[in-house]
Amino acid sequence: MNPNITLLGQMISFAILIWFTVKFIWPPLMKAIEERQQKIAEGLAAADNAQKNLAQAEEKVNEELKLARTKANEIIEQAHQRANQIVDQAKNDAVAEAGRQKALAEAEIAAAANRAKEDLRKQVSALAVSGAEKLLKREIDANAHKALIDELAAQL
């Protein structure tokens, strides 16, 4: 066999293989590669969009958390203010009740003092009447009169 013919046969076979590959195999292969590249590009774009959406969602979540914290702090502050108001109201009520109780106690003390004074007046008037009776029963003598007054003063 002649190497030139073999080489020429191989070159023709290779040229037919290249033509066949370019004509029938290469276009569908390139089409599949292009479709795959397009799908990958779309997937990357979708991933980028998802990242952007995730970042926006995180920002919204952070904003909502800030708002919720602010609102919670406001509610806590209102609760503290209300608690302080309740404590102040209770103090005021306690002071008013103490004043009322004090006034009642002072009125009772004044009434008891008045009763004691009335009792004392009754006793003094009874002693005075008794002393006057004794004076009238005795003869009117200055020394006896003075002794009787001293005795009545001692009893008072």
Image (tube, helix red, strand yellow):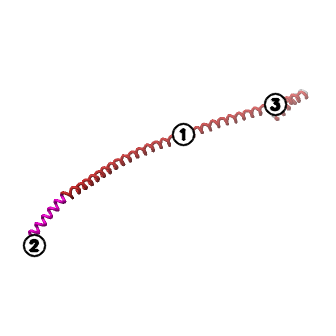
The magenta stretch is 1-22
**Magenta run includes residue 83:** no
The residue that disc 3 covers is: 122
Q: Which mark is residue 2?
A: none
**The image quarter in which residue 9 lies:** bottom left
Q: Quadrant of the N terminus?
A: bottom left
The image position of residue 139, as x and y in percent, is 91, 27
In this rendered view, identify the residue nearer to me: 46 or 53: 46
Q: Amino acid at mark 2?
A: Met
Q: Nearer the viewer, residue 10 or 67?
A: 10
Mark 3 Cα-neighbour bin, 10 Å: few <14, some 14–19, many ≥20: few
Q: Residue at x 82, y 35 (%)?
A: 155
Q: Earlier in the sequence, mark 3 or mark 2?
A: 2
Proximity of marks 3 and 2: CB atoms separated by less than 8 Å: no
Q: Secondary structure at mark 1?
A: helix
Asked if 66 appears above or below 18 in the picture, the reply is above
Decide which of tag 1 and tag 2 comes sooner along the chain: 2
Closer to the chain start, of discs 1 and 3, is 1
Q: Nearer the viewer, mark 3 or mark 2?
A: 2
Amino acid type at circle 3 is Lys
- Whole-percent x and y of residue 135? 88, 28
For disc 2, the marked residue is: 1
Quadrant assignment, res 36: bottom left
User: What's the residue type where badge 1 is placed?
Assistant: Arg
Of marks 1 and 2, the one in the foreground: 2
Dot label at residue 82: 1
Q: Residue at x 83, y 33 (%)?
A: 152
Q: CA distance from mark 1 to mark 3?
A: 59 Å
